[in-house]
Image (spheres, rainbow, N blue to C red):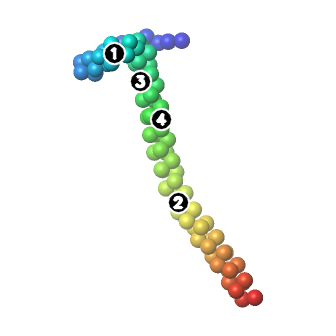
Amino acid sequence: MSKILSLKLKNEIFEETESILRKTKHPRNAYINEAIHFYNRLFTRKMLKKQLLKESAIVAEDSMAVLNEFEKFEEGLLGEDNGN
């Protein structure tokens, strides 16, 4: 199903688009649909990146604490091996 939209474009954007459409013989509707689809994917990725950075910052401190504990554990095991 499709939706009908009324769209206002800046003149320079419209002219640039029309120039591309003339050269590519691509339908305007398909071109605009593809452009919006591309932008939606790009924006979704930007939002995901922002969320991942936020969540990474939240767990970074805990991750470092776990790493330090593993290092202490490993040092303890290596110390036992050297003592035998």
Would you name the residue on which mark 4 appears?
44
Query: Distance from label 4 to label 2 (Cα)?
Result: 24 Å
Q: Which residue does the image show at 45% across and 45% down from the upper left?
A: 50
Query: Distance from label 2 to label 3 (Cα)?
Result: 37 Å
Please tell me whether mark 4 sits on a helix, a strand or a loop.
helix
Q: Nearer the viewer, residue 11 or 3?
A: 11
Specify the amino acid type for callout 2.
Ala
Query: Distance from label 4 to label 3 (Cα)?
Result: 14 Å
Find out whether the residues at labels 4 and 2 contact each other: C-beta distance under 8 Å: no
Please tell me whether mark 3 sits on a helix, a strand or a loop.
helix
Please tell me whether mark 2 sits on a helix, a strand or a loop.
helix
Say few, some or many: other residues with alpha carbon within 10 Å of mark 2 (under 14 / 14 to 19 / 20 or more).
Answer: few
Would you name the residue on which mark 2 appears?
60
Question: Visible in this render: residue 14?
Answer: no
Q: Nearer the viewer, residue 42 or 68?
A: 42
Would you name the residue on which mark 3 appears?
35
Question: Visible in this render: residue 23?
Answer: yes
Would you name the residue on which mark 1 appears?
23
